[in-house]
Amino acid sequence: MHIEVPRVPQEILTAPSPRDEPTSEQIRKQVEAVQALQVARQGVLNSKLGVKQIDEICVLDKASQQLINRAMNQLGLSARGYHRILKLARSIADLSASEAIGQMHLAQAIQFRSLDRQ
């Protein structure tokens, strides 16, 4: 996954951190919990899913399927790229404690993966 990170202005870097932002420790615990969920659900992390497992675990509703079809056509994605997006969308949904992959999860995964193509 690639994420474009813009330059942070100095005044933001030197300002006191907001108290409502999660700490690194809290984020680490959330990631560990999601990884445990993935292993309990399918025996491996989402990144290690095979094609058959992806088809079973990364089920999309009709609107989400249309969204990824448009992305495949516009970005010229291969089958491999398609499966990578689905695995990433599943991980994003897991981090959101969502049982289903929603359009927002899928759109975010498409955005992250499209940075690979730049």
Image (cartoon, grey):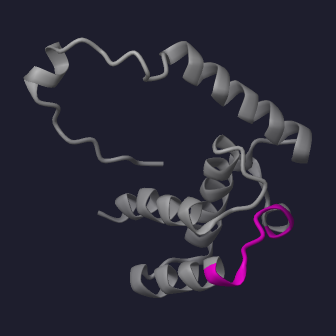
Asked if residue 3 lies left or right of residue 31, the reply is left
Q: Position of residue 44 (x, y in %)?
A: 82, 42
Asked if residue 30 lies left or right of residue 54, the reply is left
Where residue 50 sits, quadrant-wise, is bottom right
Where residue 76 sits, quadrant-wise, is bottom left
Relative height, residue 90 to residue 22 (above, below): below
Q: Is residue 39 magenta?
A: no
Quadrant of the image containing the C terminus: bottom left
Q: Residue at 37% of width from left, 46% of height from top? A: 3
Relative height, residue 115 to residue 95 (above, below): below
Q: Position of residue 48 (x, y in %)?
A: 74, 48
64 or 50: nearer the viewer? 64
63 or 111: nearer the viewer? 63
Number of marks? 0
Q: Residue at 68% of width from left, 55% of height from top? A: 90
Q: Position of residue 17 (x, y in %)?
A: 30, 15
Relative height, residue 2 to residue 15 (above, below): below
Q: Residue at 56% of width from left, 78% of height from top? A: 68
Kindly give the residue lying farthest to the left in the view shown.
10
Relative height, residue 40 to residue 54 (above, below): above
Which residues, given as a range, are shown in magenta?
A: 55-63
Q: Residue at 81% of width from left, 70% of height from top? A: 55
Q: Position of residue 22 (x, y in %)?
A: 49, 22
117 or 9: nearer the viewer? 9
